[in-house]
Image (cartoon, rainbow, N blue to C red):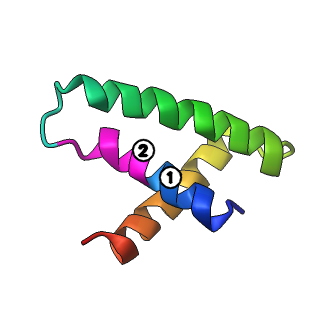
Amino acid sequence: MIPSEQLRHLAELYNGFANPLDPFDPRAEECEAAFSGMLDDLHATHAPSFFGADFRRVAIRQCREWLRKNAP
């Protein structure tokens, strides 16, 4: 559903706010805002007929799978 290069970037943003070393780091909020913006763009481009909340769940699942397979 999401092209691999975009999924990599989306997963890195997701990881930046879902798993921060310091939850009060301002970068976590920046990552969350960037993730939401990118997710909205991807939804509009690749799956506009898909319900937004469902698209978000699928995208987060894909991010988690990407991180599990590609994290050091």
What secondary structure do most residues of the magenta stretch adopt?
Answer: helix
Q: Could you tell me which residue is drawn at 25 percent across and 47 percent down?
A: 19
Provide residue 60's location: percent of width, then percent of height.
Answer: 50, 52
Asked if residue 47 can be seen in this view, the reply is: no
Asked if residue 18 can be seen in this view, the reply is: yes
Q: Residues within 10 Å of mark 1 (few under 14, many from 20)?
A: some
Q: Quadrant of residue 5?
A: bottom right
Q: Which residue is mark 2?
A: 13
Residue that extends furthest to the right in the rendered view of this protein: 49
Provide residue 28's location: percent of width, then percent of height.
Answer: 29, 31
Q: Which residues are magenta?
A: 12-20
Q: Quadrant of residue 13?
A: top left
Q: Viewer-proximal residue, 57 or 42?
A: 42
Residue type of the residue flagged with mark 2:
Leu
Is 13 positioned to the left or the right of 49 in the image? left
Residue type of the residue flagged with mark 1:
His
Q: Is residue 59 magenta?
A: no
Labels 2 & 1 near each other (Cβ < 8 A): yes
Provide residue 43's location: percent of width, then percent of height.
Answer: 73, 42
Q: Could you tell me which residue is drawn at 38 percent across and 77 percent down?
A: 69
Q: Could you tell me which residue is drawn at 34 percent across and 49 percent down?
A: 15
Above or below, 38 relative to 29: below
Q: Which residue is mark 1?
A: 9
Where is the C terminus found, in terms of image quarters?
Answer: bottom left
Where is the N terminus found, in terms of image quarters?
Answer: bottom right
Q: Viewer-proximal residue, 22 or 50?
A: 22
Q: Is residue 13 magenta?
A: yes
